[in-house]
Every structure is written in structure tokens, then in C-alpha cells.
């Protein structure tokens, strides 16, 4: 199945960070092993890989098909429990063309607009926000 998905270049959202509860197939190592076998997979890492943000960003350095979803990340809800490392903020700009806005709406413990505010307060600029909130999804899913 993975080989067929790789050949088709279909983006796959995968919940692989070990938060809120680790499992046998969560965390960066199972994903790194998968990508070693199928390096052209287009994996969209849900929640930016929380709480292993750095490790998943490191994996993305070596695989251009690795994408990220922002669901719950950068909100007060996640920042209280699994804050995005300040030292990694610069890498958000670097991966700006591979990050897509996610919301999990309506199953979220905060108002929808707060997820957008969380991105805005990163202060990475309007171009970055436009990429993350629209342009990347349009390009990746062939929507215009």
C-alpha cells in the first residue's frame, strides 16, 4: 500500500506524534523508518508532530515530501501542555511552503479564530500566513 501511495504522490495525513499518549507506532522513529523504505511519500504530520516537534522537523530536512499540519499547535491550549520550542521558530519560515493550516473544527477546546490568531502571533509575516492558510493547500491538492 505504501508503495502505491508513494507512486501516486497522494498526500497522507498521519497522526504520528506521541502526544497525547504514546503508542507502539507513534513518535519519530517509526516515521523515519517508513520514509527510509518509501522516501517519496507525501506525509502530512498532524499537529506538527507534537510533542516531538524538533525530531519531525529534522526528518523533514531529508524528505521533501514531508508536510506539516498546524492543528492545535500555537494555540494557548497546546502551548500550555506541549509548547512549540522557541528555538525552532526560525525553521517555521524555512518550511513555510510545507506547512498547512489545520483546525479539527468543531472538535476543539477554543474558538476557531484562536487557531488563526496563534499563527498570526508567530509574526512570520503576511506571505507566510497566506502560504500556510491557503496557497500550500491549493498547490498540494491542485486547487488552483
Image: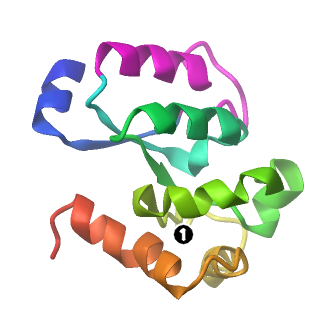
Looking at the figure, which quarter contains the N terminus? top left
Q: In this view, does 131 lie to the left or right of 118?
A: left
Tag 1: Cα neighbours inside 10 Å, few (<14), some, or many (≥20)? few
Count of marks overlaid on the render: 1
Q: Residue 44 lies in what quarter of the image?
A: top left
Q: Is residue 34 visible?
A: yes
Q: Which quadrant: the C terminus?
A: bottom left
Percent coordinates x, y for residue 112 in the rendering:
60, 78
Above or below residue 32? Residue 66 is below
124 shown above or below 100: below
Q: 47 and 55: which one is in front?
A: 55
Residue at the image position 44 percent from the left and 75 percent from the top: 133
Residue 136 location in percent, x, y? Answer: 34, 67
Q: Residue furthest right?
A: 80
Q: In the image, is residue 51 part of the stretch drawn in magenta?
A: no
Q: Where is residue 96 in the image (x, y as percent from the top left)?
A: 48, 63
| Residue located 51% across and 79% down the image | 129
Q: Where is residue 98 in the image (x, y as percent from the top left)?
A: 42, 56
Query: To which residue does mark 1 refer?
Result: 106
Please state the extent of the stretch shown in magenta in the rendering.
Answer: 16-38
Disc 1 is placed on an element classified as loop
- Quadrant of the image occupied by residue 71: bottom right
Q: Is residue 127 above or below residue 5?
A: below
Choose between 26 and 129: the one closer to the eye: 129
Amino acid at each position: 500500500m505504501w508503495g502505491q501511495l508513494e507512486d501516486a504522490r497522494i498526500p497522507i495525513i498521519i497522526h504520528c506524534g506521541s502526544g497525547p499518549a504514546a503508542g507502539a507506532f507513534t513518535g519519530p522513529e517509526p516515521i523515519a523508518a517508513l520514509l527510509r523504505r518509501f522516501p517519496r511519500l507525501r506525509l502530512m504530520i498532524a499537529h506538527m508532530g507534537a510533542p516531538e516537534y524538533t525530531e519531525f522537523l529534522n526528518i523533514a530536512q531529508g524528505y521533501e515530501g514531508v508536510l506539516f499540519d498546524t492543528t492545535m499547535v500555537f494555540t494557548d491550549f497546546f502551548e500550555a501542555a506541549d509548547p512549540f520550542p522557541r528555538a525552532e521558530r526560525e525553521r517555521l519560515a524555512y518550511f513555510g511552503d510545507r506547512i498547512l493550516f489545520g483546525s479539527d473544527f468543531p472538535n476543539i477546546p477554543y474558538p476557531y479564530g484562536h487557531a488563526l490568531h496563534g499563527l498570526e502571533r508567530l509574526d512570520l509575516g503576511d506571505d507566510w500566513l497566506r502560504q500556510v492558510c491557503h496557497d500550500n493547500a491549493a498547490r498540494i491538492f491542485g486547487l488552483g
